[in-house]
Amino acid sequence: MEILRSPRELAEMRKAGLLVWQAHQRVVAMLRPGVTTAELDAEVDRFFAEHHAQPLFKGFPGAVPFPASTCISINEEVVHGIPGKRQLAEGDIVSVDTGCKLNGWCGDAAATYAVGRVAPEVRQLMDVAKNALSLAIALLDRCSRWSQVAAEMEAYVKKHRLSVVEAFVGHGIGREMHEDPQVPNFVGAQMRRGHGDFRLAPGLVIAIEPMVNIGTKRVRTKADHWTQVTADGRPSAHFEHTVALTENGPWVLTAGPNGETW
């Protein structure tokens, strides 16, 4: 069941969300060929430490605890990429996902960035994934149920002959990074039968995160136990914001100081 937050609680979550936005700007300033993913992660880690914020991802439980403050996924890597010695190259796309907890409240956001020029089909992939997120945010106060939003997101992606990753979904967020409800970017069989849907009401806070592939929607896990790659090796893009639904409409808690989204 979804949890509804008070205006005071949303204001606290906004503080965490703004830090996440600022951490992304640190990454953007460093993006260039030759930079390693470990260097990007170290900058985000330092930034959170400077602001007394707890990285949400570091130590996250799994077969191997996640070792970094960011997930950095390149090209065919969909999500959960582990930062390391790999250097960025001209034409790469880099999906950066990070989050923090500040004063007991969480923020979580992801974006896919281009390193220099990318192929036209890859640029379209990035645009469609980004626009799917923007579409979902715009529909939050126009729809009564999440299934209506998810259907529009899925239709938009498929109209561009791209695929929606179904192995991973968004989530509720608040005191913890992952809370109820699950937030799919598609309408699966269970939701069509009325299971897993939820109402859209003021106070709801969700992390909406479409992942879009050029080829198949299927993914596989690499030997590091974390990194997810497309099954056909073709590129993937990922965008995410933490969004609250208020009496005045959607509020993107991980936007910039003037409301800038990706």
Image (cartoon, rainbow, N blue to C red):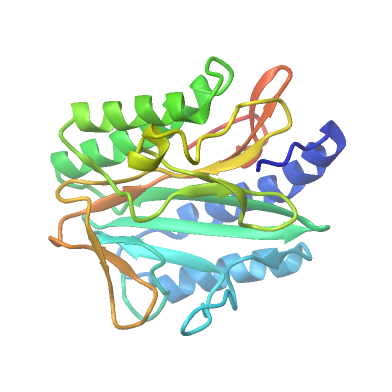
**Looking at the picture, how far across and down is residue 228, in whole percent?**
32, 66
Eyeballing the image, is 234 above or below 42? above
In the picture, residue 72 is in which quadrant? bottom left
Q: Nearer the viewer, residue 143 or 25?
A: 143
Q: In which quarter of the image is the N terminus?
A: top right
Please identify the quarter of the rendering in which residue 257 is found.
top right
The spot of residue 97 in percent (x, y) is 48, 57
* Residue closest to the far front: 193
For residue 35, above or below residue 16: below
Residue name at image x 30 percent, y 34 percent = 127
Whether residue 15 is visible: yes
Any part of residue 131 in sight:
no
Which residue is rendered at x = 76% and y = 62% of the image?
A: 51
In the image shown, does 129 or 201 lie closer to the viewer? Answer: 201
Residue 203 lies in what quarter of the image? top right
Horizontal and vertical percent position of residue 26: 55, 56
Q: Where is residue 114 in the image (x, y as percent from the top left)?
A: 31, 49
How many numbered circles does the render carry? 0
Please say if 32 is above or below 211. below
Q: Which is nearer the eye, 232 or 97?
A: 232
* Relative height, residue 201 to residue 225 (above, below): above
* Residue 197 left/right relative to 117: right
